[in-house]
């Protein structure tokens, strides 16, 4: 039986996306003006990336660096002087949200949490330093061992530079080099694997897969994922239907789509 709290989880994610989108439109760095049915999706590609940075408690400088890169590389413009103001407003809004976000990794094992943090380290370079001691602890619990990892596990979350240095050293000592497989594909594959093996409740991950596909990592293989992942958006919405029998059928459809996705990914060991 599906947990009644799933309803709120999906509703909260959608509300978060809408609120981030509203802030982007209030900023409107392209100066195009909002027109429903015409250009309302103009800034949608930034939603997931901003949400992930906020959830991971990235600094204002890290979020601004992301936006600067996206404006130059995706939108083809030089970042305006108002970017820093937008970032501060975004952070104020985020901090004002009480009880924010059910944990995405609540169902994951320590090894899965460590591996996802590792993939994001290679993919985005933005694993918040204050989370690294807990990630190191997950690694130790999972059976990994190195002196930097042990030191990091006992470090203060506020030791930003030291935590990043120790995490990089731990990865090197453990022989965990940048993966041959695109880290984005590995993250998607891990979520799908969790759905198929019963570690992750399907409805809780359908919306996440959709958001990940809204702005996949660069590369031909990652780009091909966008259309497949977008199919999970409708299913995430249908998870909120009050009839349990309907939610159960949606859950079965998510599992089937996850199976199809796993067959197309075939990224090797994750």
Image (cartoon, rainbow, N blue to C red):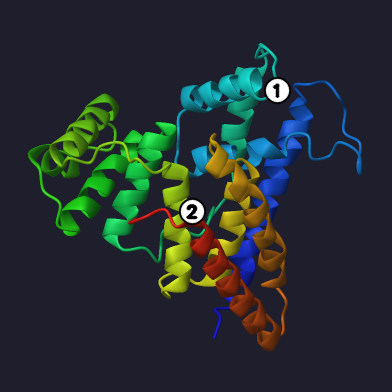
Determine whether 74 is above or below 171 in the image. Answer: above
Q: Residue visible at 60% across and 42% down?
A: 223
Residue 50 position within the rendered picture, expressed as x and y whole percent measured from the top left: 58, 37
- Secondary structure beneath disc 1? loop
Quadrant in the picture for residue 175? top left
Decide: few, some or many residues near mark 1? Use Cα within 10 Å; few <14, some 14-19, many ≥20. few
Determine whether 41 is above or below 140 in the image. Answer: above
Residue 76 position within the rendered picture, expressed as x and y whole percent measured from the top left: 69, 17
Q: Please state if 177 lies on the left or on the right of 261 as rendered.
A: left
Quarter of the rendering occupied by the C terminus: bottom left
Decide: few, some or many residues near mark 2? Use Cα within 10 Å; few <14, some 14-19, many ≥20. many
**Mark number displayed over residue 75:** 1
Residue 169 position within the rendered picture, expressed as x and y whole percent measured from the top left: 17, 32
User: Are the residues flagged by discs 2 and 1 in contact, CB closer than 8 Å?
Assistant: no
Quadrant in the picture for residue 229? bottom right
**Mark number displayed over residue 188:** 2
Residue 241 seen anywhere in this rendered image of the structure = yes
Q: Residue visible at 61% across and 46% down?
A: 224
Determine whether 116 is above or below 22 in the image. Answer: below
Distance of mark 2 from mark 1, alpha carbons?
25 Å
């Amino acid at each position: 039986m599906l947990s009644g709290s799933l309803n709120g989880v999906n509703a909260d994610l959608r509300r978060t996306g809408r609120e981030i989108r509203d802030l982007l439109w209030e900023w409107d760095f392209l100066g195009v003006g909002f027109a429903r049915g015409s250009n309302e999706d103009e800034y949608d590609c930034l939603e997931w990336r901003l949400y992930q940075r906020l959830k991971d408690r990235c600094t204002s400088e890290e979020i601004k660096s992301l936006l600067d890169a996206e404006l130059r590389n995706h939108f083809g413009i030089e970042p305006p002087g108002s970017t820093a103001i937008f970032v501060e407003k975004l952070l104020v809004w985020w901090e004002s949200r009480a009880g924010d976000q059910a944990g995405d990794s609540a169902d994951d094992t320590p090894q899965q949490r460590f591996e996802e943090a590792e993939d994001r380290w290679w993919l985005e370079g933005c694993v918040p330093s204050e989370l690294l001691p807990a990630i190191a602890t997950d690694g130790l619990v999972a059976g990994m061992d190195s002196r930097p990892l042990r030191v990091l596990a006992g470090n203060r979350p506020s030791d930003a530079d030291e935590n990043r240095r120790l995490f990089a050293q731990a990865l090197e000592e453990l022989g965990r080099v940048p993966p041959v497989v695109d880290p984005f594909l590995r993250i998607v594959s891990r979520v799908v694997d969790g759905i198929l093996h019963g570690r992750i409740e399907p409805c809780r991950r359908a919306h996440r897969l959709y958001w990940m596909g809204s702005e996949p990592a660069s590369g031909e293989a990652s780009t091909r994922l966008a259309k497949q992942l977008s199919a999970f958006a409708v299913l995430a919405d249908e998870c909120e239907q009050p009839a349990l029998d309907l939610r159960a059928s949606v859950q079965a459809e998510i599992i089937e789509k996850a199976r199809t996705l796993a067959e197309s990914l075939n990224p090797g060991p994750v």
